[in-house]
Amino acid sequence: MMQEHIRAIDGLRGLGILLVLMHHFGFFQPGWAGVDIFFVISGFLITRILLRTKDSSGYFANFYARRALRILPLYFFSLLLFFLVVFPIGARNGWLSHYGTRDFVWYLFHLSNWWIGSGHMSPSPISHFWSLAIEEQFYFAWPLMVFTLHRRILVRATVAIALLSFVCRAIAAAMHPETTGFIYFYTPFRLEPIALGSLAAIAADDQPLWTRFVSYQQTLLWAGFTLWITTIFLGDNRLICVFGFSGIGAVALAMLIEAANGHSAFDTPFFRHLGKYSYALYIIHYPIYLLASHTFRNCDRFWKPVLPVIGGIPLSYLLARVSWVLIESPFLGLKNKFEQERTSRGVVTPGELAVCVAADRSPR
């Protein structure tokens, strides 16, 4: 049984954002795996709360209202800041390319991953929003599937989505060996970790199934890690996109299973603290990195990569704290107006209470 507060998954979220920071600031290239950790967590928490509120009144309205209050204020603030202020100023001074209405529309409707994957706006200070777009697309479609499908069929659909995502990546990599960049961004290719997290959420309501999941935790962890690290060392982008994504998905699922049972190496104050501010850190860190890199571009070979880290990461953290106080928290306070009723079954399954709490407080 889990504790009432899901501290371990907060810490796992902290690991995810730390890996992303390390990737973008240039001192751990495989840190892109942090995004896959976020995907698994999102699939788990969102599916769990949807299952728990499936038979409640206002199922759709309350879910979308609460997600909007959590995600959209900082997201739209960032879009307006960049498209109305940063991009025009940057274009006039030659710092940035000109980005206009056509680009803005893709971001407005949370389709930026398709736009970026097609070769537009990459790199840009907001090109990392692609992963948020995939999660928003998941939020848009998944509640209807959870609502309409019987649990057994939902399990099969979730497994099918994960397998199809893998097969689609394999086919795409075989058909386009000259370029695999689009595989990184397009939604069908990145649904596997979200589906894995969702499958774990469904299993959490079934004691025998959850026990089986737990029994495979170590196998998933080490087999996934071996597969992931092998593709990294081989350095073939096709192998990374096909097998490496699956490997890190398995690792993330294994860490989630462990965390969902209240045991995690990342259940520490440091990682939980990072997890609390992970959404704002994700939004803010990449433009700060680009700004810091531009500022210190003329430094010598030693300081050129070091100074952006020394200045950029603390500044990103400071701005994330400011965002939490001035933008995120005031809107989070409004979520109480859209309380979601829990479906009572008379049985508390492993992690049930704490997972519901975590989904409501989720930074992403």
Image: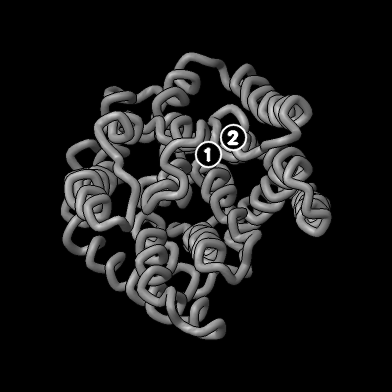
Give the percent coordinates (x, y) of residue 36. Answer: 59, 48
Question: What residue did someone put label 1 on?
Answer: 43
Front-lying residue, 243 or 311: 311
> Residue 64: x and y, percent?
30, 31
Q: Are marks 2 and 1 in contact (CB under 8 Å)?
A: no
Q: Residue at x 72, y 42 (%)?
A: 246
Q: What residue type is labelled 2?
A: Phe
Secondary structure at numbered mark 1 = helix
Number of other residues with Cα within 10 Å of mark 1, as a class: few under 14, some 14 to 19, many 20 or more: many
Secondary structure under the numbered disc 2 in the rendered image: helix
- In depth, the one of 176 and 227 nearer the eye is 176
Neighbor class of circle 2 (other Cα within 10 Å; few <14, some 14-19, many 20+) is: many
Identify which residue is drawn at 51% across, 84% down. 300
Residue identifier under label 2: 182
Circle 1: residue type? Gly
Q: Is residue 134 among what the camera can see?
A: no
Left or right position of 216 against 127: right
Q: Could one spot residue 34 in this view of the protein?
A: yes
Compare residues 141 and 128 and report the one nearer the observer: 128
- Which image quadrant is residue 59 in? top left
